[in-house]
Image (spheres, rainbow, N blue to C red):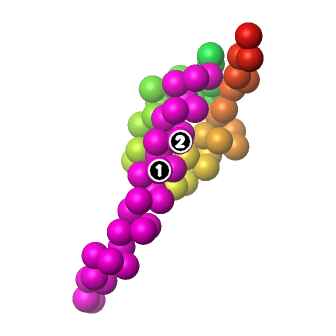
């Protein structure tokens, strides 16, 4: 199976890295998460892009503090 050229893969790679960065930023700013500790959500987000990030945003995101 031939590998697609880099110009076709680069947008998908950039979107994946940006999504992972958003998930990490959100993990940093929340006080606590649900179901798993923060470090476990971070590992899950990194190992299974985009499914780990989607799972974190839907299930694990805690409440943010606006104080």
Secondary structure under tag 2 reads helix
**Any part of residue 48 in sight:** no
Q: Identify whether 64 is placed above or below 57.
A: above
Q: Identify whether 46 is placed above or below 64.
A: below
Decide which of 27, 52 is in the foreground and name it. Answer: 27
Q: CA distance from mark 2 to mark 1?
A: 6 Å
**Any part of residue 12 in sight:** yes
The residue located at (30%, 83%) in the rendering is 4
The residue located at (60%, 40%) in the rendering is 56
Residue range in magenta is 1-30
Residue lying at the far top of the rendered structure: 67
Q: Identify whether 51 is placed above or below 8.
A: above
Decide which of 35, 2 is in the foreground and name it. Answer: 2
Q: Quadrant of the C terminus?
A: top right
Say whether residue 58 is left or right of residue 52: right
Residue 30 point in image, percent of width and height: 62, 22
* Quadrant of residue 27 within the rendered picture: top right
The residue singled out by tag 1 in the image is 18
The residue located at (25%, 88%) in the rendering is 2
Residue lying at the far bottom of the rendered structure: 1
Say whether residue 4 is left or right of residue 34: left
Number of residues whose C-alpha sits closer than 10 Å to that of mark 1, classed few (under 14), some (14–19) or many (20 or more): few
Q: Which SS type dominates the magenta stretch? A: helix
Q: Which mark is residue 22?
A: 2
Residue 1 point in image, percent of width and height: 27, 89
The residue located at (70%, 22%) in the rendering is 64
Do the residues bearing badges 2 and 1 touch, measured as CB atoms within 8 Å? yes
Decide which of 48, 6 is in the foreground and name it. Answer: 6
Residue 25 point in image, percent of width and height: 52, 32
Secondary structure under tag 1 reads helix
Number of residues whose C-alpha sits closer than 10 Å to that of mark 2, classed few (under 14), some (14–19) or many (20 or more): few
Q: Is residue 55 magenta?
A: no
């Amino acid at each position: 199976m031939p590998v697609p050229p880099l110009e076709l893969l680069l947008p998908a790679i950039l979107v994946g890295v940006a999504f992972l960065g958003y998930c990490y930023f959100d993990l940093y700013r929340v006080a606590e998460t649900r179901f798993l500790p923060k470090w476990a959500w971070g590992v899950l987000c990194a190992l299974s892009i985009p499914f780990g990030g989607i799972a974190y945003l839907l299930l694990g995101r805690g409440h943010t503090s606006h104080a």
